[in-house]
Amino acid sequence: MKLDDFDASDVDVEDQRGGGGGGGGGLIPGLGGGRIGLGTLVVVLLFSAVFKVNPLSLLGAMPATTTQPSRPATAAGGDAMASCNANAESHEACAALASLNKTWAAQFSEGFRRPHLVFYSAEGNSGCGAAQSAMGPFYCPGDQGIYLDTDFYRQLADQLGAQGQFARDYVIAHEYGHHLQNLLGTSGRVQQLQDSDPAQANPLSVRLELQADCYAGVWAALNRERMEPGDMESGLNAAHQIGDDTLAQAAGRNPVEAAFTHGSSAQRMAWLRKGLESADLKACDTFGGGQ
């Protein structure tokens, strides 16, 4: 995807790399107030395959976290451009963020706020608790931050076989989709439904994640003139590789649909494709339009 270059005014960046990190709070949970990132289930399933641990017990053991008020985005490790230019992956992520900001700001008549991108290495802090690289990229509604350890991109390509720039752009666009859900009030409504009916927590989580996939597709469609040959295939392959069933099978486990939190490979591909083909947020009604 041919993305424009950007300047510091296009993005809000915080850099926790080399500045400590870690600290209080638990892992971001798959249910309740926090988020599971794209990589969390990957690591849990790979861990369970090696050590013969039930992955559901690991996910269930993740403690809940509470959200905190939004904080202004700062580049703790220097200015935004220095952080974005720390390496090629960081620059690419900032370019995607700048495009997402521009694209989605134009779709909102009011109430739009940009998220901030937080780079960290291995460990960091978020408004939803500790950030750890094992979680993969994630969005924290408490501080409206997208958290990224760019080493995840290596895992995405080498361990999951999801290669190409657009696969990486899809990661950022998916997490940005969660920011849109936060702005639109979808996340809050889903949280209330999950609290009132815990048995529906996982199915509701799946619908939320599939909608974020669809939103990622809409962003790409609204920038269709910038897409290059192979981009769509790269994105759809990434969606397939991070489906709950594919990850379970890769870890030597039988997929258990009741335990899915992000959706099957077929579901994730279908909703990403729907966004790509429709270029319309209204087409991403995973709650009223089925799965």
Image: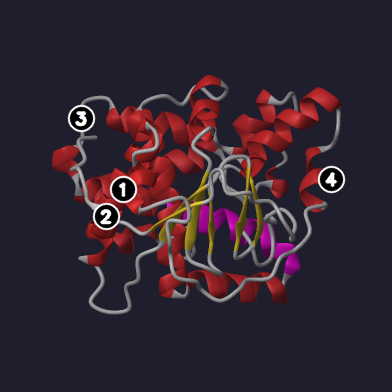
Assess whether mark 1 and mark 3 are in contact (beta carbons under 8 angstroms).
no
Q: Position of residue 60 (x, y in %)?
A: 80, 52
Depth check, front residue: 45 or 200 = 45
Which mark is on residue 8?
2
Assess whether mark 2 and mark 3 are in contact (beta carbons under 8 angstroms).
no
- Which three-letter amino acid code belongs to the residue tagged 3? Glu
Which mark is on residue 228?
3
At label 4, counting other C-alpha atoms closer than 10 Å, the crowd grade (few under 14, some 14-19, many 20 or more) is few
Give the mark toward the camera: 2 or 4: 2
Q: Residue at x 33, y 28 (%)?
A: 233
Per the image, the residue denoted by label 1 is 81
First reached walking from the N terminus: tag 3 or tag 2: 2
Assess whether mark 1 and mark 2 are in contact (beta carbons under 8 angstroms).
yes
Q: CA distance from mark 2 to mark 1?
A: 6 Å
Q: CA distance from mark 3 to mark 1?
A: 26 Å
Q: Residue placed farthest to the left in the image?
A: 225
Q: Is residue 200 magenta?
A: yes
First reached walking from the N terminus: tag 3 or tag 4: 4
Per the image, the residue denoted by label 4 is 57
At label 1, counting other C-alpha atoms closer than 10 Å, the crowd grade (few under 14, some 14-19, many 20 or more) is some
